[in-house]
């Protein structure tokens, strides 16, 4: 392409050159897409502490210029800090949460109680069947209620 004074602009020729050395109007220029910046929690907290420590006029502005930030970043990050969002983003251990020894012992005892209760029900059923078999074979007379014994 030519600039206002008629000279050839080197950047546009390099971007749009086809095999013939001319610009191809059918091919759009491929520009790098702007990427959204992402800030870590540690970075945000460091910037907030520096901004909170600023004492003189213009010190916060210098910090923002040096880091390439806007004042809206500080406002949003201060709000997030007050709401406790930074604590929610702190890394946590993966896996099941650890329990205290008392909780583990309580869970073990409950499991054992449940297992013994099931064994008791099965044992009572076996005893009932043995009583009925003994009665059918005539080995034992049916038991009488406790009030009839007297």
Image: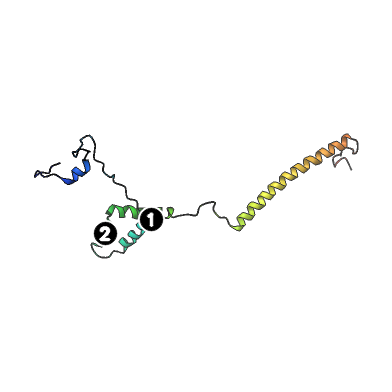
Mark 2 residue crowding within 10 angstroms, few (<14) / some (14–19) / many (20+): few
Residue drawn at point x = 54 percent, y = 53 percent = 97
The image quarter containing residue 84 is: bottom left
Dot 1 falls on a residue whose secondary structure is helix
Q: Nearer the viewer, residue 63 or 27?
A: 27
The image quarter containing residue 20 is: top left
Q: Residue furthest front?
A: 20
Q: Residue furthest bottom?
A: 55
Q: Nearer the viewer, residue 30 or 36?
A: 30
Dot 2 falls on a residue whose secondary structure is helix
143 lies left or right of 47: right
Residue at mark 1: 41
Badge 2 vs badge 1, beta-carbon distance below 8 Å: no
Pick whichever of labels 2 and 1 is earlier in the sequence.
1
Q: Is residue 44 above or below residue 11?
A: below
CA–CA distance between discs 2 and 1?
19 Å
Question: Could you say which disc has been placed on residue 66 in the image?
Answer: 2
> Residue 132: horizontal and vertical position, in percent?
84, 36
Residue drawn at point x = 17 percent, y = 46 percent = 10
> Residue 63: horizontal and vertical position, in percent?
27, 60
The image quarter containing residue 87 is: bottom left
Mark 1 residue crowding within 10 angstroms, few (<14) / some (14–19) / many (20+): some
């Amino acid at each position: 392409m030519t600039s206002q004074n008629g000279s050839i602009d080197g950047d546009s020729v390099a971007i749009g050159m086809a095999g013939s050395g001319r610009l191809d109007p059918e091919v759009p220029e491929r520009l790098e897409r702007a990427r959204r910046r992402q800030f870590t929690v540690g970075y945000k907290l460091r910037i907030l502490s520096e901004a909170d420590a600023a004492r003189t006029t213009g010190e916060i502005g210098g910090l923002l210029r040096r880091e390439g930030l806007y004042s809206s970043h500080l406002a949003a990050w201060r709000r997030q800090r007050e709401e406790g969002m930074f604590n929610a983003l702190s890394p946590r251990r993966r896996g099941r949460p650890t329990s205290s020894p008392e909780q583990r012992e309580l869970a073990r005892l409950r499991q054992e109680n449940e297992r013994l209760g099931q064994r008791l029900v099965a044992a009572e059923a076996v005893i009932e069947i043995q009583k009925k078999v003994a009665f059918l074979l005539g080995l034992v007379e049916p038991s009488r209620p406790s009030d009839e014994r007297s």
